[in-house]
Image (cartoon, rainbow, N blue to C red):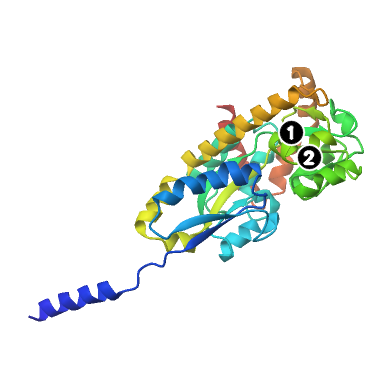
Amino acid sequence: MIKTLLKTGALALTLIAPMAEAREMRVSSFEPPQGFYSSKILQAWIDEINPKLSAGNAFRLYPGSILGAPPAQAELVKAGVADVALVVPTYTPGLFPMTGVVEIPGLVQSSAVGTDILNTLAEEGALEKEYADYKVIALFTTPSYRFFMTDAAAETPADLDNLKLRTPSKFGSELFGMVGASGVGIPAPQVYENLERGVVQGAVWVMDAYRTFRLNEVAPYITTAHFTASPMAVLMNKRAYDSLPDADKAVLDEMSGRATAEWIAGVVDSTDAEIEAAFRDDDNVTFVDLDAEAQAAWDAALTGAPAAWVAAQPDASQAELVLERATAVSAR
């Protein structure tokens, strides 16, 4: 009789216990709604995952830095202001130090290569501390950056002497210093204006940004040097993930990790190639393709980059191991 009452009471408590509250989950992007990562990556991911979630649970895109500025994205997720965000790890120096290894010139030719590097490091535990506060949806990279110049093409390192260029990061500025240039930090939407006014004479960036921000109008010279690349991440608030029903967690797990990162890399690389092909047909844009001899001159000028990156890290011995592994993955 007592056992029956206990079972009945337990059943009643189960029936009246509050269900996990269904809610909208905020996905933050610093790009405008029509931006490449907002539309082709984040919104595409949202459109695929939402139908698989429990009734009432859904992700919604908040683009255009509605929730916070580009450098704030990682903190927005950690604080729960955003549930998910597109993060550029190098925008916040010190938070994701080992992730920045992909900035070293020559390691990343394509997003596929950079994505392989970061996911291999993550799977082997080298990035565990950096992302301990997050559910990682995807780690990937841009393709290698090209030079976009206003007045003349950058064919040799000497062509950058005493010029000011828009830098992608703190380490990017160090790289510019190795070739005699100075780095200037400029938010993406303001790059066009600063190129037009001559505040900077060029930028290193990718083709989707070249098209999105109409840089062909002010920087018609493109050099296809593999100068550097930027790491990218889609991160989720860990508490938000843990609060979801198990079925929704399983869906998120399925749509996270290497497979999702490789899908993103495929979209990134194919789009980069498509945009490049379109601009190569534009008579107002001049491409400079470096042959082996010309590329060797850039490589020689940047030969100190790996040591400079290691020296800048809080744990040099760990950085050496990460660099060694990243170099091996890049070469395979």
Amino acid type at image mark 2: Leu
Q: Earlier in the sequence, mark 2 or mark 1?
A: 2
Q: Classify 187 as above or below 10.
A: above
Tell me: 128 left or right of 186: left
Badge 2 element: helix
- Residue nearest the observer in this picture, 17 or 302: 17
- Residue nearest the observer in this picture, 91 or 273: 273
Q: Classify 103 as above or below 6.
A: above
- Residue 230 percent across, percent down from the top left: 67, 42
Report the label total. Answer: 2
- Residue 222 percent across, percent down from the top left: 79, 29
Label 2: few (<14), some or many (≥20) within 10 Å?
many
Amino acid type at image mark 1: Phe
Q: Classify 251 as above or below 161.
A: below
**Circle 1 is placed at which residue position?**
227
- Residue nearest the observer in this picture, 56 or 126: 56
The residue lying furthest to the left in this view is 1
Please state, as top left, top right, bottom left or bottom right, where the C terminus lies in the image: top right
Q: CA distance from mark 2 to mark 1?
A: 9 Å
Q: Nearer the viewer, mark 2 or mark 1?
A: 1
- Residue nearest the observer in this picture, 274 or 115: 274
The part of the image, by quadrant, that contains residue 1 is: bottom left
**In the rendering, which numbered label is found on residue 175?**
2
- Residue 279 percent across, percent down from the top left: 74, 27
Q: Residue at x 64, y 39 (%)?
A: 102
Question: Quick check: can you spot residue 221?
Answer: yes
Q: Residue at x 59, y 65 (%)?
A: 81
Q: Are marks 2 and 1 in contact (CB under 8 Å)?
A: yes
